[in-house]
Image (tube, rainbow, N blue to C red):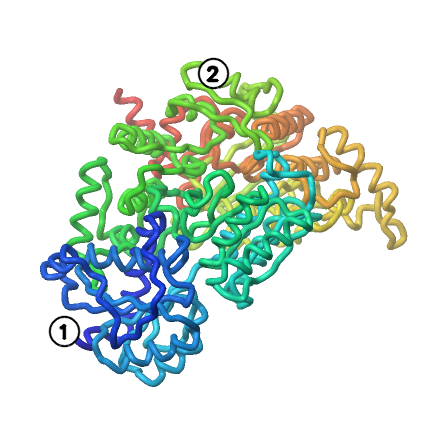
Amino acid sequence: MRKNIFTKATMRRAAAFGLAGCMAAASLTGCGSSKTESTTAANAETKVEAEGESKAEAADGSDIHVGIIFTEAGLSGNSFNDLALEGVKKAADDYGITYDEVEPKSVSDEEIIQDEMASSGEYDLIICVGAEQVDALTNVATTYPDQKFALLDANSDLDNVASYSCKEQEGAFLAGALAVLAKQEKIDDKLNDGKVIGFIGGVDNPLINHFAAGYQAGAQYIDPDMQVLIDYAGSFNDPTTAKTIANTFVEKGADVIFHASGASGMGMFQAAEEKGFVAIGVNLNQNEIAPDYIMASMLKKLDYALGIGMVHQHFMLVNQLTVLENIILGKESGGFLLNRKESRKKVEELVERFGFRLPLDEKVENLSVGMKQRVEILKTLYRGADIIILDEPTAVLTPQEVEELFKILRQLKKNGKTIIFITHKLNETMSLSDRITVIRKGKVVFNCDTCDTNEKELATQMVGRQVESIVTKAEDPHGPVVLELKNVRLHKRAQETVSIQVHAGEIFGIAGVDGNGQQELEEMIVGNRKTEEGTISMNGKEVQNLSVKERKAMGLGYIPSDRHKDAMVPDFSITENFLLGYQEDPKYCKKGFIDYKALEEDAKVQVEQFEIKIAGVSQHIGQLSGGNQQKVILGRETSHDPSFMLVAQPVRGLDIGAIERVHKTLLQLKKEGKAILLISAELSEVMNLSDRIAVLYEGEMSAQFKAGQYTKEEIGLFMAGKKQEDVANEMDQQ
């Protein structure tokens, strides 16, 4: 037997990552065996079958011996104990470890068992399941500083204890939201119109309180008037008490009950069958216990265990690590000791199979946005995902990167993977998908095969009415210069400065992948960032040293890229938000006092003009949809007759209907002779609205041209860093 094989740091990392992987793999396996007799470490039976033992002899971890101590609830009811056991079983299969398992009869037995295991010197790792073991473990781990422990579902600061915990409040929040939504939608005839649901916990401790708080918060997020009854069985192994609590909840009107009570939950499920209410399980998929009464289960480490992977719009990568390290992070090969060679082999096999082109040893921070996205997709594949969900995956890609992404997705489909592609871009939907689902206001309103529909019909289904496709004809600037930037350096890394002119009656578009100087440009023009080099002029007057207030007084209207941070106060009313930035306007400020009557009347005019859907102008703006929030901001900024409008990412997060309204407003402002600088990561938006376009790449201007001069693909080259003169030369040679 190998003893003391880990340093302190190695052990913490190995346990955290290794157990996470085991737990994930076991999230939806079947329930374990049930045992009634308690054992101690001295007489615990080794639960490794002959097959497992033969594997142990051949595997790298064959000399690793693990002990696992469950909570007093035991192994029953698809509880957290069962989930932990499945993880250890998988470690035995995958890495060849041997293990002993022990079920205490009571909480008081836990410290005795921990001490006997630690004092025996037989275990490389002792796993303690459940928060109720923390106090005992603190004493024992302190007594045996050389013994390595792992604590599941709780945290410890001791150097020889590796902790593994979950954000149970987040899953419980979703359970609460689901409970109320199910009631509102009447998805089951067991549900009523009442305002009462319930939660049953095992014991009243911080861990279970997290479940209760999350469940209540989720329910009241959907319906603030929803009453959540909360009670505790007093044990994780008392089905009788849990059943009694459930019956009491039903008498008080509860028709949905969620539990985090271990084996006690079996009593709740029995009550559901007898009383006819809807139950929500926990930890493992408990539906099989009472299929007609258990609506859902809150699972821990569900995603990859079910073969589901998620590629988020904002990447979840560690920039300082290499591509390979990001892919394998949390799912390392080799068990407790990282086997980098084996991990690389697995990744390389995936790269070859799906046609990825990735430099595995390059740091992520040095990759393009498109390459980072491939890393995210490969992460899901490495974890065994068969269903891959992508959220607005093309939002920050060049046209070339979009096409490359689509090639990868089609290859994944060819290899049997299921792709769920979430987007508001209709052309991409039509190009890539086989089937389409349209969701409006949280409900499915349309389903069809892609071949049976078109962009126009999809737009109508998304908005609920016909939507006008807006494409303006580019015009040469003919009005006076309203905004001028001369030799402005956007950031220190930029080798070249930026110079542009925006004329009255013109929309000047700034294209480029996010993060290439757009934010710096926006902040310098409005006055939220100091201009270190160069000059900025409005209507012939330099403004780089003026405040935001002074620039607005000179005719600046501003739609910021982050409306929540820079354009609104969520807890203020629509009327109050209409005042922001114009508190000293003589129209509203008279002798130091705000004329709220005049302000409210103007707010009502803008609400009507922009067709803002609200309960009234006293409603908090934070309660509105993103589209309606943006309309309020548009109304405010345009109502003061600006000569110049700085409009940054104006349709980010908006539906097609709101996008249409924003675009019509910008074109109307142009018609009225306003100068507009449009900064957008949506290339189609820039191309459809702009008279002239500039492309930013790493803080420099890679191109500046009249709209229509270049194709979408050619502009994509500029967005990727190719200079305008190089593209022009290539075109001449063709």
44 vs 55, left or right, is right
Q: Nearer the viewer, residue 345 or 709?
A: 345
Q: Nearer the viewer, residue 582 or 382?
A: 382
**Relative image position of residue 343 (x, y in whole percent):** 20, 53
**Relative image position of residue 626 (x, y in whole percent):** 62, 39
Q: Which mark is residue 17?
A: none
Pick out the residue farthest to the right. Answer: 591
Q: Quadrant of the C terminus?
A: top left
SS assignment at label 1: loop
Placement of 155 over or under 431, stated as above or below: below
Q: Residue at x 51, y 20 (%)?
A: 458
**Relative image position of residue 248 (x, y in whole percent):** 64, 54
What amino acid type should be assigned to the residue bearing mark 1? Met
For discs 2 and 1, the disc positioned in front in the rendered view: 1
What amino acid type should be assigned to the residue bearing mark 2? Asn
Q: Quadrant of the N terminus?
A: bottom left
150 vs 261, left or right, is left
Residue denoted by label 2: 454
Label 2 Cα neighbours within 10 Å, binned few <14 / some 14-19 / many ≥20:
few
Which of the 4 quarters of the picture holds residue 482? Answer: top right
Asked whether residue 561 appears in the rendered view, the answer is no
Q: Are marks 2 and 1 in contact (CB under 8 Å)?
A: no
Residue denoted by label 1: 1
Q: Earlier in the sequence, mark 2 or mark 1?
A: 1
Which of the 4 quarters of the picture holds residue 33? Answer: bottom left
662 vs 120, left or right, is right
